[in-house]
Image: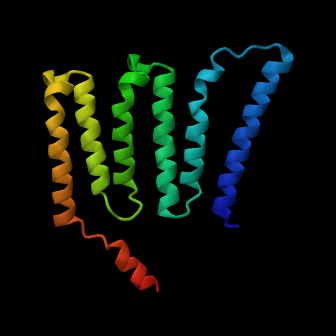
Amino acid sequence: MSSSRKNGQLFAGILIAGLGVILAVERFSGFEIHGLFHLWPLIVIGFGVARLVSGGSTKERSSGLFLVFLGSWFLINTLHIYGLDWGESWPILLILLGLSKLILPEDGRRSGGLLLLAIGAWTFVSVFGVWDLDWDNSWPIAVILVGLFIVWRALFDNAPSRQAKEVSND
């Protein structure tokens, strides 16, 4: 087992054991930790950090970054930061997923991240009524974004195709 994977497992184990200690103290001592359960997204963030720190492949680091972003989104909703809740903050998740694909693309392609970022920004603007856009009159923007995404990939995405990778591996 590689040392980076071992460190990631060590971090995850300490995180889970620490959570168990806190829960046991609350359960058996009568000492109440108010609001502890509102911090459950920190576990998701912790697993993401463990994957990022463990090094490994780009795919593992990318999934770690996504878990950090996902846990942050869960935390924002759970604690109602800036008054956000699950129903109106979901465009932020699309933006964060797009950012994770831009920062650490799994296959060298960033165009999917650009599309997610653009759709997340568009839905964010629509949900919060910025520039007087609403769903009824702004949905053609999504069609435009998908079309531009296809054009972008056709013209500028120079990553080797999967078939070319498979042929070179044989």
Q: Residue furthest right?
A: 28
Colour scheme in the image? rainbow
Question: Would you say 48 lies left or right of 103 here?
Answer: right
The percent position of residue 39, horizontal first and vertical second, equals 59, 26
Q: In the picture shown, does residue 99 fall above or below 76?
A: below
Q: In which quarter of the view is residue 3 placed?
A: bottom right
The percent position of residue 169, horizontal first and vertical second, equals 46, 83
Q: Which of these two is toward me, 65 or 119? A: 119
Specify the quadrant that holds the N terminus: bottom right
Question: Would you say 39 lies left or right of 33 here?
Answer: left
Q: In the picture shown, does residue 156 fall above or below 120?
A: below
The percent position of residue 165, horizontal first and vertical second, equals 39, 78
Residue at image coords 71%, 16%: 33
Question: Would you say 53 lies left or right of 83 here?
Answer: right
The percent position of residue 94, horizontal first and vertical second, equals 35, 39
Residue at image coords 85%, 17%: 29
Number of marks in picture: 0
Question: Would you say 145 lies left or right of 116 here?
Answer: left
Residue at image coords 46%, 54%: 62
Q: In the picture shown, does residue 27 fall above or below 66?
A: above
Q: Residue furthest front?
A: 136
Q: In which quarter of the view is residue 125 placed?
A: top left
Q: Which of these two is toward me, 47 or 128? A: 128
